[in-house]
Image (tube, rainbow, N blue to C red):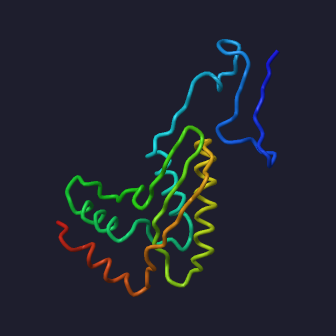
Amino acid sequence: MTDNTTSVGSAGRPEAGVSTLKGRTGAGAPAETRGKTTMADGVVAKIAGLAAREVPGIHHLGGGMARAFGAMRERVPGGGGGGSVTQGVKVEVGERQAAVDLNIVVEYGVSIVDVTGDVRTNVIGAVERMTGLEVVEVNIAVDDVHLPDEEGAEESDAGEGRVR
């Protein structure tokens, strides 16, 4: 007989980090319970970065310095010209939980409150669905607002110093 018990908190939900599973191990146990899976911080950061970039109204991730270093990295041969998916993303990953910090640049004219809410929803959904980790918080710092007239300046800066 198998006895599965989970400690329940005062709100009626399982408490994080308190779940205990008692029962058979070895050949008689289900395959998904045999062994341990760990997630590297970089894996969670990539998932969070891609999920944040999917939200309409996000122009870029990363603060001014991070974007400057990213642009410099793109100009160096072999420096990773595609830009880093994890730029502007910092994560802390535990055994069962993760916390995400994002630095974003939003498009001018969008509701920052709505965009950040959508980013939180998308990041939490993607990380929890793909990793099984509970996302305890998504902190967002809005570092800049991208103005429409900045397009020409960015394109001319991107073209400088490149060999054609």
The residue sitting at 78% across, 29% down in the picture is 5
Q: Would you identify the image quadrant in which residue 113 lies?
A: bottom right
Q: Which residue appears farthest toward the top when viewing the image?
A: 27
Residue 148 at what x, y percent from top left? Answer: 43, 85
Total residue callouts: 0
Task: Say if 7 sits above or below 99 in the image.
Answer: above
Quadrant where the N terminus sits is: top right
Give the image location of residue 110, x and y in percent.
57, 80
Q: Where is residue 132, by image quadrant?
A: top right
Q: Picture quarter containing residue 16?
A: top right
Q: Please state, as top left, top right, bottom left or bottom right, where the C terminus lies in the image.
A: bottom left
Left or right: 150 in relation to 96? left
Left or right, 136 with reference to 164: right
Q: Residue at x 35, y 59 (%)?
A: 83
Q: Is residue 85 above or below residue 43?
A: below
> Where residue 10 sits in the image (x, y, percent)?
79, 46
Which residue, as the protein is rendered here, is positioned at the far bottom? 149
Q: Which sits in the foreground, 26 or 56?
A: 26
